[in-house]
Image (spheres, grey):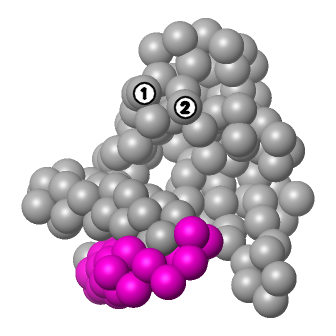
Amino acid sequence: MIEEAAPLPPTVYPLAKGRAWAMLAGSLVFVALGIVFLVAHSTVKMTVAGALAVLFFGFCSVLFIQRLLRDRPELVLDDAGVDHVRLGRFGWDEIAAVRIREQRVRNTSQRFIELVLHDPDAYLARAPELVRRTASLNARLGFGPAIMAVNTLPVRPEAVLDAMRRHCPGLPADGLA
């Protein structure tokens, strides 16, 4: 007779508040620079750059403020699946694999955890609006629609992959792809 393993308690990752505050501060600095470009408006390019900076980094600032004010975990893993604050809920049966990805731009890089989905279109049909809007950009960069930035998590992405494998043994997962 095969005994079923006892369910694991959920693995909860809170928002890395120090990093979120730093990203908010950085966004506000760029909003201020955008305002300076708008006020100086010595050229059309500066005016356009200022307007774009204020809009984009203002939007980023609002998102960081919302995340800091909400007392909700960034990521929760349990025996049923994954719940991410921005991406929503996934059952383990929806996830074909997980992997750590890296996007390099000039001398810097950003790491992500990518959930490779069996049916990305089914996910996009129920995904939050911001995810649906960024899906085509992600696709052009070679990513699927379910990408988690790891800069707001309090642990390294390898620790998250290890926890995912504990909750879903046999889940294909690999390091940097």
Residue in the image at 71% along x and 41% along y: 137
- Dot 1: within a 10 Å radius of its alpha carbon, few (fewer than 14), some, or many (20 or more) residues? few
> Which residues make up the magenta segment?
18-46
Q: Could you tell whether 131 is left or right of 67 in the image?
A: right
Please name whichever residue, 174 or 56, is drawn nearer the observer in this view of the structure: 56
- Kindly identify the residue that appears in the image at 77 percent across and 66 percent down: 102
Quadrant of the snapshot with the C terminus: bottom right
Left of 116 or right of it: where is 125?
left
Q: Nearer the viewer, residue 68 or 154?
A: 68
Q: Secondary structure at mark 2?
A: helix
Q: Which residue is mark 1?
A: 129
Residue pictured at 72% horizontal, 42% vertical: 138
Reply yes or no: does residue 37 show up in magenta: yes
Q: Can you say which quadrant of the picture contains the N terminus?
A: top right
In the rendered structure, are the residues bearing label 1 and label 2 in contact, judged by CB atoms less than 8 Å apart? yes
Front in this rendered view, residue 174 or 146:
146
Vertical side of 129 occupied by 12: above or below: below
Tag of residue 133: 2
